[in-house]
Image (cartoon, grey):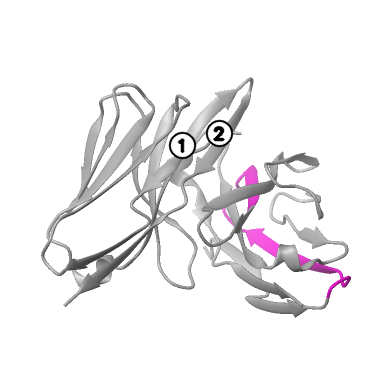
Amino acid sequence: GQQLNQSPQSMFIQEGEDVSMNCTSSSIFNTWLWYKQDPGEGPVLLIALYKAGELTSNGRLTAQFGITRKDSFLNISASIPSDVGIYFCAGYTISGSARQLTFGSGTQLTVLP
Amino acid sequence: NAGVTQTPKFQVLKTGQSMTLQCAQDMNHEYMSWYRQDPGMGLRLIHYSVGAGITDQGEVPNGYNVSRSTTEDFPLRLLSAAPSQTSVYFCASRGRDSWADTQYFGPGTRLTVL
């Protein structure tokens, strides 16, 4: 199946710092998604990207759909304590009439006061 | 709307026992899915359904059965639990005409198989 390589696996940053994480794949994706998961909860969608080269912001979050359609990054600016959690990238591919969603392994973010 | 609900929230089983994880949604969504989440592996698709009466296998279907008799419910059955099935299980749903930006996840079921 499809594979997404997400990095880094974990990050420890100071409050106020900017954060960057990315996902790469050997396969082409039609849609890139970024989710956040809080402890004990299910993932919640942060940003969806639909076109190669697309750059989308959601508050302090910015994500880009790579030109090659094989990568995406997520930036968080001026981090705050509530940014703590696991961030997942995910991508949709289309196989026939089916859309397959593949998740990265996640980036655990810790924000230190 | 309650969104996507899952029960139970926690469960401990012995090897060989069977159980059903419940998932329900009140948004009239056609698509429903079950994922398992293991440390360092993200979420992997177990089974999915594109509508009542229709189910299909995902990436890791072995050891699990599903059925979709109604639009609202999508239970996941473990027929003979194994320690390898210790994981956190998430149910998700989305509407037919929507892309991933309207896929909603439930709060998860944390399963331990001894």
Q: Which x, y percent locates residue B101?
A: 42, 43
Q: State the image coordinates of residue A25 (x, y, percent, origin top left).
A: 43, 32
Left or right, B17 with reference to A61: right
Q: Residue at x 58, y 67 (%)?
A: B108
The reply to whether the C-beta atoms of the residues labelled 2 and 1 are less than 8 Å apart is yes
Q: Amino acid at mark 1?
A: Gly
Q: Helix or strand or loop: what does disc 2 sit on?
A: loop
Element under disc 1 = strand
3D distance between C-alphas at marks 2 and 1: 9 Å
Residue toward you, A15 or B26: A15
The magenta region covers B15-34
Hey, what amino acid is under mark 2?
Answer: Gln
Quadrant location of residue B31? top right
Residue B28 is at least partly visible in this image: no
In this rendering, position of residue B34 left or right of residue B39: right
Q: Is residue B65 left or right of residue B88?
A: right
Which of these two is toward me, B5 or B17? Answer: B17
Magenta region includes residue B19:
yes
Is residue A101 rendered to the left or right of residue A106? right
In this rendering, is residue A10 above or below B62? below
